[in-house]
Amino acid sequence: MSPREFVVLGTASQVPTRERNHNGYVLRWDGEGILFDPGEGSQRQMLHAGVSAHDLTRICVTHFHGDHSLGLAGIVQRINLDRVPHPVTAHYPAGGQVYFDRLRHATAFHETADLRPAPVSGDGTLAVTPAFTLSAAALSHPVETYGYRLQEPDGRRMVPELLAAAGIEGPDVGRLQQQGELRGVRLEEVSAPRPGQAFAFVMDTRLCPAVPRLAQGCDLLVIESTFLDEDAALAEDFGHLTAGQAARIAAEAGVRHLVLTHFSQRYTEPADFERQARAAGFTGGLTIARDLMRVPVPKRRPAAASSRPQDGPGA
């Protein structure tokens, strides 16, 4: 299994269908498992997708409409039932604290897990780990809503040929990486830049400045496309995007792989979303999400191709 992949639990918007469960997504990123927007039925979809409660280290809720959060009660209870031994941090809009509290304690159960609420109260950085920085930016929807971006720090890739020429081998390679210089050999002389990878999750929103900022330079962008382009007026009225709008943003932001999801029940033909996304000028990797599919994070781009901005969405 790829150490970095996106697992789709559900792809419906407000109303689930026979083919589409309510929202739910898990990002596997090395040792982390981030659950996004657990809608109704997410616990069962995790079982079908081969994702366990023990895999989860964070929960990110974009907003408290039911199709993005009604499954939170079951997820919280499953984390406790399975006695997940590590802390699980929950990010969600601060203005929805009352909804989080109701869902967390929706029914009686025995609390065994360490669930750590971390409400989001504005744009900016939410968490910094050795593996990534997680940030949020406010979107435009009828209720308080945030998009999330995960950014890996830039690093360096060791070049075997240069190491051999410099006489650096075995444990000395690790020492050089830690110290930056060893026996007159600098790290920069035997390595190459390794741009950090980026992922963004953008759900219910109409067009607003935060969307392209979250998407900028992403290796993998997951974004709602509730409506097709012919229903753009409805999208604007209800605070959503069309397939063409989402794809145009991705193209302008230099996204490498685009995942469209959160489809209205009025549409039954996935090919229509793909057609409109391509017509909007997006030429990168494209996935029209289906329940229980897996989307690998693309392999690293060459250093010269990196278009990541210096500042995150909270700048």
Image (tube, rainbow, N blue to C red):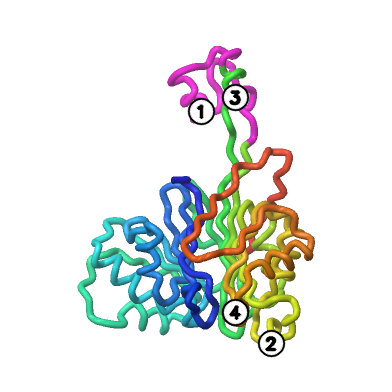
> Which mark lies nearer to you, 4 or 3?
4
Secondary structure of the residue carrying tag 1 is helix
Indicate the amino acid at tag 2. Answer: Asp
State the residue at coordinates (49%, 73%): 19
The residue indicated by pointer 2 is 237
Q: Tags 1 and 2 in contact by the CB under 8 Å rule? A: no
First in sequence, mark 4 or 3: give its number.
3
The label nearer to you, 3 versus 1, is 3
Residue 35 location, quadrant: bottom left
**Which of 5 and 144 lies nearest the eye of the viewer?**
5
Quickly name the residue at label 4. Answer: 264
State the separation of the CA atoms marked 2 and 4: 14 Å
Residue 241 among those drawn in magenta: no
In this view, the residue in front, 276 or 109, is 276
Question: What's under tag 3, amino acid-wise?
Answer: Val
* The residue stretch that appears in magenta: 164-193
**Residue farthest to the left, as pictured:** 110
Q: Residue at x 59, y 79 (%)?
A: 264
Q: Position of residue 150 (x, y in %)?
A: 55, 56
User: At 23% across and 70% down in the image, what residue appears?
Assistant: 111
Q: Please provide percent x and percent y for residue 231.
A: 72, 82
Residue drawn where x is 38% and y is 62% of the image:
48
- Mark 3 and mark 2: Cα distance apart in space: 53 Å
The first of marks 3 and 1 along the sequence is 3
Real-space Cα separation, disc 1 to disc 4, in angstroms: 54 Å
Mark linked to residue 159: 3
Closest to the observer, 309 or 4: 4
What numbered label is drawn on residue 179?
1
Within 10 Å of the Cα at label 4, are there few (<14), some (14-19), or many (20+) other Cα atoms? some
